[in-house]
Image: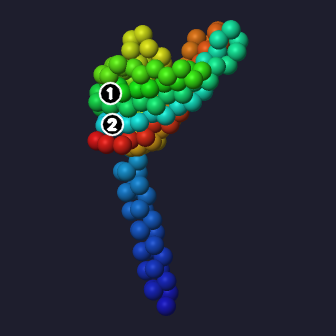
């Protein structure tokens, strides 16, 4: 009976160890190559105009190339109800550090965002950043992978 219990406990411990090793292999740190494929970005927030918040929303496709560069096949934004579409094939750059935080800049001289991803980055969050000494946009949203 003791041998059976020891064998069962040993088997369970080995299963947990192997499961944890598989999880660790599956959840490696991030890098620029983590972001590859077509994503959709959906964000809402406000521009600040003369100290008054003005509603803003954006939906856009972003193609991450896995090398720190990106393109924007299509984008539509609304600022205070005024709709504008960006020309296709805008460009930008990004970096994604090992801790899965990074930054993204559209343009130049477009807006800059901080980004926060999980390993594999099938879905992550971005927030627009500005000069910390000035009131600027308050815009944050979710980016989801839709194709390779």
Residue lying at the far right in this picture: please name it: 51
* Image quadrant in which the C terminus is located: top left
Question: Mark 1 — residue?
Answer: 73
Q: Who's the residue at 46% across and 31% down the image?
A: 59
Q: In the depicted view, which residue is nearer to us: 27 or 45?
A: 45
Q: Total label count?
A: 2
> In which image quadrant can residue 108 be found?
top left
Say which residue label 2 marks.
Answer: 38
One can see residue 100 in this view: no
Residue drawn at point x = 49 percent, y = 28 percent: 58
What colour scheme has been applied to the protein in the rendered image? Answer: rainbow
Expressed as whole percent of the image width and height from the top left, the position of residue 133 reads 64, 9
Q: Position of residue 29 (x, y in %)?
A: 40, 39
Of residue 79 and residue 89, the one placed in the foreground of this image is 79
Residue 134 drawn at (x, y percent): 64, 9
Q: Residue furthest front?
A: 82
Residue 126: image x %, image y %? 51, 30
Residue 4 visible within the image = yes
> Circle 1 — which element?
strand
How crowded pointer 1 is (Cα within 10 Å; few <14, some 14-19, many 20+) is rated as: some
Q: Residue at x 49, y 83 (%)?
A: 5
Label located before the other in sequence (1 or 2): 2
In this view, the residue in front, 58 or 22, is: 58
User: Marks 1 and 2: which is nearer the front?
Assistant: 1
Report, in whole angstroms, how far the alpha carbon at label 1 lies from the one at label 2.
9 Å
The crowd level at tag 2 (other Cα within 10 Å; few <14, some 14-19, many 20+) is many
Task: Indicate left or right for 138 with 32 as reference.
Answer: right
Q: Are marks 1 and 2 in contact (CB under 8 Å)?
A: yes
**Height in image: 125 above or below 20?**
above
Q: Is residue 56 or residue 114 the one in the foreground?
A: 56
Q: SS of the residue at dot 2?
A: strand
């Amino acid at each position: 009976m003791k041998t059976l219990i020891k064998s069962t406990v040993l088997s369970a411990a080995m299963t947990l160890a192997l499961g944890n090793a598989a999880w660790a292999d599956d959840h490696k740190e991030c890098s620029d190559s983590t972001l590859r494929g077509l994503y959709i970005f959906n964000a809402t927030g406000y521009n600040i105009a003369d100290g008054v918040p003005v509603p803003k929303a954006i939906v856009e496709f972003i193609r991450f190339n896995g090398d720190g560069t990106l393109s924007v096949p299509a984008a539509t934004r609304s600022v205070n109800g005024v709709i504008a579409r960006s020309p296709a094939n805008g460009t930008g750059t990004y970096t994604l550090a090992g801790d899965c935080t990074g930054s993204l800049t559209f343009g130049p001289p477009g807006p800059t965002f901080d980004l926060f991803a999980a390993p594999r980055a099938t879905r992550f969050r971005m927030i627009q950043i500005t000069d910390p000494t000035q009131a600027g946009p308050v815009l944050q949203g979710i980016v989801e992978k839709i194709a390779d």
